[in-house]
Every structure is written in C-alpha cells, then in structure tokens.
C-alpha cells in the first residue's frame, strides 16, 4: 500500500510538472537575421480542443525592427504547415508576436524584408521583398460598424461601444451558433489584440482564444489566431 501511494504521488507530481512545463516559454532561438530571435509556448485546453502555439520576437540590440515572417509549425495532423505574417516595432522589450490555433509545436521561423529604425530614422529593407501591406499602428482608424462577410460566406455584425468592437454572428454553425460573439477587441490601432470564440462540433463546450485583428483597409479585416485565419470583407449589399 505504501509503494502504491508513493507511485500515485509520483504520477501526480510528474503530471503537474508536465502541465506547467508545457506553458513555459522556450529558449530564444535564431532566425535568418542574427539580430532577431523568437520563442514560443504551447497553450492547452481540454481534450476536444486542439492546442495553440503562442510565439514572440525580440531584437537583440537597441534598435527597432519591422519585418515579414514565415512560421513552420506542427498541426495536430502531424504534417508541417506554415503561417505568414508581419511584425512591427519589435525591440528588446516590445516582443510582438501572434497565436497559431491547432499547433503542437514550432520548428522554425524565417524573417525577411527587415526594416530597422535607428535614432528616429527608418532604414531600407535588407532585401527586395516588400513588407506585407498592412497599415501601421498610427494609420487613421475607420468605422467598422455594419455587416461583414467572411470568405466562407458567414455573416457577422460589428458594433462599437467606446473603443470596444464586437463581431456577433448573424449566421452560425454547430461549433458557435448565430447571435453569439465571434470575436472582439479594443480598436485603438489598425492592428490590435482581442479574443475569439471557438467550439467543437462534438461537444457543446466553447472557449476563448487570443487573436490578432488587423484592419487592412475600410473594407477588409483579417483575424489571426483561428485555425484557419479569417478574412472579412464589408458586405455592401447588407
């Protein structure tokens, strides 16, 4: 009986340690640029919802960088997938980053079109590739209220209360039904953090995941962090 008790305590301690370690940041790892590094951790939920990978960047000197990135990661299916994006204003303390839904781990991140800002001056990109055409944080805000159509045809209605914008489903599915919130966040710049609601077709349980909402222009919104990412276009025929 004593041996069994010791074994059970060991299992509990190992399980607790494993769960805690899963949320610890990895060490900083190299990209193609010697001055830009990345790290990640895995966010787990219940057995019906796939884990997410949260990743960040840092600049190893005192300057600021903006760049494109290409993330190679492992989805639940076991094959390798990739995610493209752009990061802005990365420094040694301002890390930026994003979330990948349905991710078991990140194997590599490549960066390109790096723009460095030194002493109030922006240097030219290091290669001829252009930076993804998302507006900077200081670009004018636009009125997002109205009906928007997702690329797969789903409709949401966006309302605004102060800085908070909320996209509520007009058409739903088995995972998240109509009239429920699809995503929301405080719209203070054209690239801002928020949360998105997702569910499973196998269970009624739903959860919130962190998302990045990017307003490309007055008629296009990208919501990054779902699996797959979502693009909404203003439904002018509303």
Image (spheres, rainbow, N blue to C red):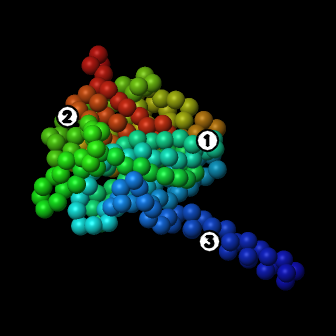
Percent of width and height locating residue 101 = 50, 45
Percent of width and height locating residue 104 = 58, 51
Q: CA distance from mark 3 to mark 2?
A: 47 Å
Which numbered circle lies on residue 79? 1
Using the image, determine if residue 171 lies above or below residue 88. Answer: above
Identify which residue is drawn at 12% across, 55% down.
121
User: What residue sits right under mark 2 in the picture?
Assistant: 143
Earlier-in-chain disc, 1 versus 3: 3
SS for dot 2: loop
Q: Nearer the viewer, mark 3 or mark 2?
A: 3
Identify which residue is drawn at 27% across, 39% down.
128
Earlier-in-chain disc, 3 versus 2: 3
Percent of width and height locating residue 215 = 27, 37
- Decide which of 206, 141 is in the foreground and name it: 141
Screen quadrant of the N terminus: bottom right
Percent of width and height locating residue 217 = 23, 32
User: Would residue 8 be found to the left or right of residue 148 on screen?
Assistant: right
Q: Nearer the viewer, mark 1 or mark 2?
A: 1
User: Would residue 198 be found to the left or right of residue 193 on screen?
Assistant: right
Identify which residue is drawn at 61% across, 52% down.
46
The residue lying furthest to the bottom in this view is 2
Q: CA distance from mark 1 to mark 2?
A: 40 Å
Number of marks:
3
Could you tell me if residue 189 is visible in this image? no
User: What residue sits right under mark 3 in the picture?
Assistant: 17
SS for dot 1: loop
Identify which residue is drawn at 63% across, 70% down.
16
Using the image, determine if residue 135 lies above or below residue 233. Answer: below
């Amino acid at each position: 009986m004593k041996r069994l008790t010791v074994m059970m305590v060991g299992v509990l301690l190992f399980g607790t340690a494993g769960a805690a370690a899963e949320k610890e940041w990895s060490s900083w790892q190299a990209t193609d640029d010697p001055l830009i590094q990345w790290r990640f951790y895995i966010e787990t939920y219940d057995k019906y919802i796939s884990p997410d990978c949260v990743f960040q960047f840092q600049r190893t000197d005192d300057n600021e960088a903006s760049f494109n990135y290409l993330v190679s990661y492992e989805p639940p299916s076991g094959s390798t997938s990739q995610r493209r994006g752009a990061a802005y204003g990365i420094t040694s303390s301002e890390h930026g980053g994003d979330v990948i839904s349905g991710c078991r781990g990140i194997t590599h991140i490549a960066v390109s079109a790096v723009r460095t800002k030194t002493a109030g001056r922006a240097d030219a990109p290091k290669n001829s590739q252009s930076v993804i055409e998302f507006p900077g944080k200081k670009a004018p805000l636009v009125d997002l209220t109205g009906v928007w159509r997702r690329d797969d045809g789903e409709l949401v209605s966006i309302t605004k209360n102060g800085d908070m914008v909320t996209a509520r489903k007009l058409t739903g599915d088995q995972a998240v039904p109509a009239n429920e919130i699809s995503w929301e966040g405080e719209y203070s710049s054209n690239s801002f953090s928020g949360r998105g609601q997702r569910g499973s077709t196998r269970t009624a349980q739903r959860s919130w995941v962190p998302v990045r909402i990017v307003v490309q222009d007055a008629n296009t919104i990208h919501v990054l962090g779902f699996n797959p990412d979502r693009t909404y276009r203003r439904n002018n025929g509303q």
